[in-house]
Image (tube, rainbow, N blue to C red):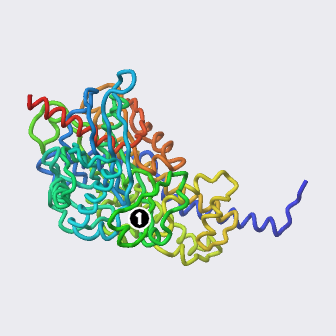
Amino acid sequence: MNILTSTEMSVMKRVFETLQLVEQILSEFRLQEEDLKKVMRRMQKEMDRGLKLESHEEASVKMLPTYVRSTPEGSEVGDFLSLDLGGTNFRVMLVKVGEGEGGQWNVKTKHQMYSIPEDAMTGTAEMLFDYISECISDFLDKHQMKHKKLPLGFTFSFPVRHEDLDKGILLNWTKGFKASGAEGNNVVGLLRDAIKRRGDFEMDVVAMVNDTVATMISCYYEDHRCEVGMIVAFVLQRSLKSLHRCGKISEAPLGINVEQTTLPRFAAEYGESHSVFSIPPGTGCNACYMEEMQNVELVEGDEGRMCVNTEWGAFGASGELDEFLLEYDRVVDETSLNPGQQLYEKIIGGKYMGEIARLVLLKLVNENLLFNGEASEKLKTRGSFETRFISQIESDTGDRKQIYNILTSFGLLPSVADCDVVRMVCESVSTRAAQMCSAGLAGVINRMRDSRSEETLKITVGVDGSVYKLHPSFKDRFHATVTQLTPGCDITFLQSEEGSGRGAALISAVACKMACMMGQ
């Protein structure tokens, strides 16, 4: 039997006291069921305000009509091109829809990822859409399809006021985009103008949708009960200069496939090729669902249903989340590109989770509860603690090697207790994000059940996004909390594969079929 020395006993006592103090600080992140129900009810109230004509402008949740009324039913055929712009990566996809082996309707895809340079994101709308047009040209060259005028579906994951399926006015940029001359203009028009300026190919832009809508439609292809789409994504933070410097990224976080992609014009200017992670573009959190037309006051007509893009990331702009915002959230908001906006997204979205965790770590250092009260310069640098580190730290098997390696890359020499505290911080931040996201989705699903007066609502939710797909625990925590908040609902969660691109192409296929039927 080993007897602990007085020194060992003293060390253990200090560690225990430290963990107690850390727990006390992290307790702010814990949300009770009543807290989540309060968030859910406030979300529902703002959803209702967003749907009504008289209160739409003031509502924080805009509930934007998408003009998507029909879903693919298996008779659509043809080749379609889809674009997917929702973050720092941009995807071009060729989608072949038709009869496959055995006579069954199927969808085949080929895609290429491109990285959006910062000067295209923050320059002019003409620069951004000329770059997008150049990427399309590059893709068509590689697939020898420039001679075809293909129907095109555009997944555009920013707040848009639709006036038709192929016409939408950009309300405001989010996710770090600032291209001037785009806000207040028809996005499809900007794309068509850029294609026309280029002049080496033709496209028939038939539909523009949000990534959540495309995800829902893509999952509907797999499960016809899918009437809700949701995205929870993180941005893969990388400086453009570092990409130019190394030419490629040799390691991808959490087993994401790496795909070498040459960018046409910008690569030529800088003299190097780029590599990007092959995952769906996107950085935030949003949801859409099929709403009863009689409740959508912004569009004429009472029959049937229409897909509504909630744009719930802006929830909180009228103070609905004030009591739940912590000091770290307020710092993240104040130092962001859009202070006072997208507050709900800043709690949930992967673009912000890492920074919240970094601020908590710094507080613990300042309280002398972590790293012996000494923070490295890298840890003090805003944006340095990426959200992928949270996923990697929570994926640690228990030997703490992964946590240790990440922390030493920050110039720190962590103890075993330091590693455990860092994991506690990451778990607190990601658990709160999952629970907050659950409250929003529960609000949507409970609303659907109430409006349909169904005793038990059987529904499928299509989900995409790297936080949902890659974080080791987010999905399970999210599912459990949604189920807890939606009694009387039988919910299936369906993880989307190539959701945004495939969904946009399927919506285009439906639009083309409907146009042909009307023309006959």
Q: Nearer the viewer, residue 495 or 485?
A: 495
Q: Name above or below for residue 329 compared with residue 449.
A: below
Residue at image coords 54%, 48% = 472
Q: Residue 344's x, y, as percent?
A: 35, 56
Residue that mark 1 sits on: 329
Kindly identify the residue that appears in the image at 58 percent across and 73 percent down. 365
Using the rendered image of the protein, determine whether residue 502 is visible from the camera's viewpoint: yes
Q: Secondary structure at mark 1?
A: helix
Q: Is residue 250 left or right of residue 442?
A: right
Name the one closer to the observer, 101 or 190: 101
Q: Give whichever of 477, 354 is nearer the camera.
A: 354
Q: Position of residue 419 (x, y in %)?
A: 64, 62
Query: Which quadrant of the structure image shows residue 219?
Result: top left
x, y percent for residue 514: 16, 32
**229 is higher (above) or lower (below) than 161:** above
Amino acid at dot 1: Asp
